[in-house]
Image (cartoon, rainbow, N blue to C red):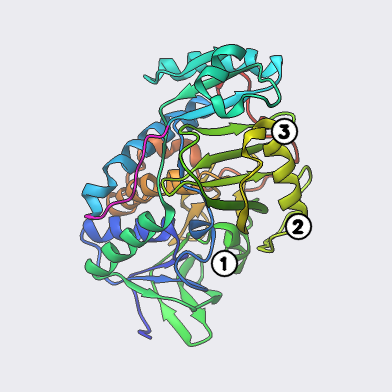
């Protein structure tokens, strides 16, 4: 292994690879990506590729709208089919309080140029007939959001990175961040030292642990999320479905005809845990059947787990760390990593290249938790931590 690099990016998932590609396009050379396992071993290979512009806050929605546009252009940018598909999206509501809240969110999203539709119970069932016969929804928020195939996107980035001269080292875990005073000097792996002027933390669910190696405390908390996939079937639905009350869950049919689904545990223990459980299998099956009983004949063929990289305010950490020159955060995406990563990579690369922070990244300051004690990710349903009306 080379003992030097200009930039070391720790994490070979979509965030790290997207940043490497964008930096290389700007003319940066000698970029080294280090992956503790293999490309896609973390969240980038375990998510379900939902590219949703609808978000609960104006700040996140602005970024998500631009991020979705970036995804729509990736096939041309990377020269590979990412299987970007505007399947549509149904945010299904089961409580009247949700309907009232989502009326405010709808208005906020329309102010940003989207055209979401807030539907009543009967129209929701007409638009989403897979729900007929199940628990009756109070309404839904519908929009023409998209899905991609995570492997298609990830390996398109990997191929582009290699073509641009980016070096990728898999099964290489960083055990120490080297410092010289208040500046980064490189990293140490089991194979030895790699000197570098810049180190980027794109380690996803491991980002909090990796940041601590540099002496930087961040509030990122990994939380396990489990999913399952069934055998393929003839098309029975198009729009992806998500619901958050009384329990959070989601399901959609893939282009191959499989049902992909998940239902969150009420109180998941924090930490990196990639074990799939029988409890999740049973919980997901019961919940999906209560919503869409016509899917009961489908047989599950596989299940898996991944982790969300959560922050207390549900926003990413992106940018240079003030008290350690050369150390950069690109993490904390709160379950939106695959959606946000390509745009984070583009904007962060531009920032690191020309020294000016893009306006869209202003609210994701990597130093905003510095010196604060309220750094715990609080338990609660999806709506917890977001202001009603979408203002933060």
**Residue 236: mark in rendering:** none
* Residue 290 badge: 3
Image vertical order of residue 33 relative to residue 74, above or below: below
- Mark 3 nearby-residue class (10 Å; few <14, some 14–19, many ≥20): some
Quadrant where the N terminus lies?
bottom left
Residue 302: x %, y % from top left: 60, 59
Residue 374: say if magenta. no
- Return the mark for residue 214: 1
In reply to whether residue 82 is colored magenta, the answer given is yes
- 147 sits left or right of 297 in the view: left
Residue 234 vs residue 73, the one in the foreground: 234
N-terminal of the pair, mark 1 or mark 3, is 1
From this viewpoint, is residue 136 visible? yes
Marks 3,2: beta carbons within 8 A: no
Task: Examine the rendered structure and indicate whether residue 286 appears above or below residue 24.
Answer: above
Q: Which residue corresponds to mark 2?
A: 278
State the separation of the CA atoms marked 2 and 1.
38 Å
The residue that appears at 49% across and 34% down in the rendered structure is 237
Dot placed on the residue nearer the N-terminal end, 2 or 1 = 1
Q: Position of residue 131 (x, y in %)?
A: 61, 27
Q: Secondary structure at mark 3?
A: helix
52 or 65, which is in the foreground?
52
Instruction: Estimate the spatial distance between the alpha carbons at disc 1 and disc 3, rounded to whole Å.
Output: 47 Å
Secondary-structure class at tag 2: helix
Residue numbers of the magenta segment: 79-87
């Amino acid at each position: 292994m080379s003992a030097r690099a200009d930039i070391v990016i720790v994490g070979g998932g979509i965030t790290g690879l997207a940043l490497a590609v964008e930096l290389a396009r700007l003319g940066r050379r000698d970029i080294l990506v280090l992956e503790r396992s293999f490309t896609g071993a973390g969240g980038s290979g375990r998510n379900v590729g939902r590219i949703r512009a609808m978000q609960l806050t104006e700040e996140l929605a602005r970024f998500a709208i631009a991020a979705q546009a970036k995804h729509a252009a990736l096939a041309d940018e990377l020269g590979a089919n990412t299987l970007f598909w505007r399947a549509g999206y149904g945010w299904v509501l089961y409580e009247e309080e949700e309907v009232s809240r989502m009326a405010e969110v709808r208005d906020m999203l329309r102010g940003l140029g989207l055209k979401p539709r807030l539907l009543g119970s009967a129209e929701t069932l007409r638009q989403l007939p897979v729900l007929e016969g199940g628990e009756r929804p109070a309404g839904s928020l519908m929009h023409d959001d998209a899905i991609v195939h995570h492997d298609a996107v990830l390996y398109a980035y990997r191929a582009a990175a290699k073509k641009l001269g980016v070096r990728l080292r898999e099964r290489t875990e960083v055990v120490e961040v080297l410092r010289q005073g208040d500046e980064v000097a490189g990293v140490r792996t089991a194979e030895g030292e790699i000197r570098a002027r810049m180190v980027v933390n794109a380690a996803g669910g491991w980002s909090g642990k990796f940041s601590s190696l540099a002496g930087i405390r961040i509030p990122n908390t990994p939380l396990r999320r489990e999913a399952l996939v069934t055998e393929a079937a003839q098309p029975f639905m198009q729009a992806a479905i998500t619901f958050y009350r009384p329990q959070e869950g989601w399901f959609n049919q893939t282009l191959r005809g499989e049902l992909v689904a998940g239902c969150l545990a009420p109180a998941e223990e924090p930490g990196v845990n990639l074990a799939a459980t029988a409890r999740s299998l049973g919980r997901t099956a019961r919940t999906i059947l209560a919503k869409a009983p016509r899917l009961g004949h489908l047989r599950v063929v596989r299940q898996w787990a991944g982790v969300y990289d959560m922050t207390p305010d549900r926003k990413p950490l992106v940018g240079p760390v003030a008290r350690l020159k050369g150390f950069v955060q690109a993490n904390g995406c709160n379950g939106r990593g695959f959606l946000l990563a390509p745009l984070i990579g583009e904007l962060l690369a531009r920032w690191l290249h020309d020294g000016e922070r893009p306006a869209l990244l202003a609210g994701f300051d990597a130093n905003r938790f510095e010196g604060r004690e309220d750094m715990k990710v609080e338990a609660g349903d999806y709506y917890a931590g977001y202001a009603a009306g979408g203002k933060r």
